[in-house]
Amino acid sequence: MADSGGRADRAGGHRARLIVLGALTAAAPLSLDTYLPALPALTADLATTPSVTQLSLTACLVGLALGQLVAGPLSDVLGRRRPMLLGAAGFAVVSVLCAVAPNVEVLIALRLAQGLLGAVGIVVARAVVRDTSDRTTSARAFATLMLVSGVAPIVAPVLGGQLLRLTSWRGVFVVLAVYGALTGLAVLWLVRESLPRSRRRAGSAAATLASFRVLLTDRRVVACVLSAGLVFSAMFAYISGSTFVLQDLYGLSPQAFSGVFAANSVAIVTSVQVAGRLAGSGRVLPERLLVVGLGIALVGTGGLLVSTLLDAGLAGLLAGLVLTVVGVGLVLPSATTLALADHPDHAGSASALLGTSQFLVGAGTAPLVGLAGSRSAVPMAATMATAVLLGAVVFGILWRGARRPGDGAIRGARR
């Protein structure tokens, strides 16, 4: 009975830690999406133009991409807990400064800093999972992370809209500051250090470059990083293009658009959980789930492109979108599991490569969807289909014949 109670306590602690890690990764989409409904008011209040205001969003996105390249290797040197605490505290402080920004130029600079600090939670949370899980259980843990953080983009715009009923855009950043402070306290109370000193690397620029060199010369890691980045960019294309496509071209009301967005969000969260359970059971290999996910996404984006080219109507477009997000939901946790599996001593750096590739490639493809304005959905569909096709081709070429490091390297210590 005592042993059973101990196992229950450990299981409860594991779940609590995953929730905290998920909350850390959710800081990024919350910082991106919560203030979106406030952009018009922010533009008027700071006496600027919409295009300049949009740079505050771009700056945050760039910070989220580049910050992971710094935070990942740093966590391999300093351990995981200290960067998480500093990142959460810094995120809270910078959010307060955003709330009192006197002009848009200062806000843009602060948003870059907010993205850099928000990136810490994303990259280090994945590294903690790799530290504390083996190849099989990490897939389920990554799926849980994505479940918690996947709810954030759905909730964030709604939360921002409701906050504007009570406060101004400055109040939105105050709420983000409170969120950062609470996640920092949760890390302090519930997340122990997962990387012992004996496994930490030397802290130098040369050691960091050597870590990235090890990863970038492993074709399996590169296959996962590139395929995940390209598939994720299809999601960016969908998110950035669906507003004008569904509302301006197909005439959906804002409420109907929100319903479609929510339904697709549920679809991707569900597929992520399915991927985690299947891989976590040990019955299905993560690489097989990744291939299946790529296949489903190819069918979805192919159908989406054909539907838009033939002007087959809203039903065909929605069906293609659902299939695409289901495929993406299978690819992302599987690619994360595989990229981090073989290099436990470089988990932070591998996590950084994954995150940076997703944000940079996504940011690069998002502008392509608006080439035809609101007159056609073809650019969005073509961008998504091309991204997924390239992801599948890259994975197939690099993964085939790639050698896997020694079995001893893939076993993470369970604690």
Image (cartoon, helix red, strand yellow):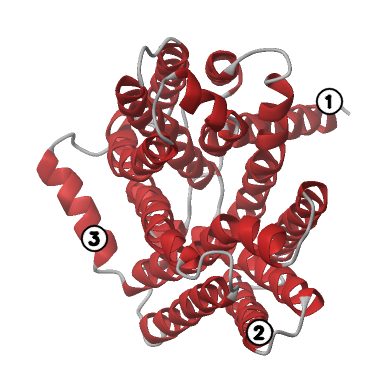
Q: Nearer the viewer, mark 1 or mark 3?
A: 3
What distance separates the C-alpha of mark 1 from that of mark 2? Answer: 52 Å
Q: Which residue does the image show at 30% across and 26% down from the upper left?
A: 109
Quarter residue 94 falls in: top left
Residues under numbered marks 1 and 3 in contact, where contact means CB atoms less than 8 Å apart: no
Q: Nearer the viewer, mark 1 or mark 2?
A: 2
Q: Nearer the viewer, mark 3 or mark 2?
A: 2
Q: Position of residue 124 (x, y in %)?
A: 44, 37
Q: Which residue is mark 3?
A: 214
Is residue 135 shown above or below 313? above
Front-most of residues 89 and 73: 89
Q: Which residue does the image show at 79% across and 52% down from the upper left?
A: 253
Q: Amino acid at mark 3?
A: Val
What distance separates the C-alpha of mark 3 from that of mark 2? Answer: 34 Å
Q: Position of residue 256 (x, y in %)?
A: 82, 53
The secondary element bearing badge 3 is classed as helix
Q: Which residue is mark 1?
A: 2
Q: Which residue is mark 2?
A: 299
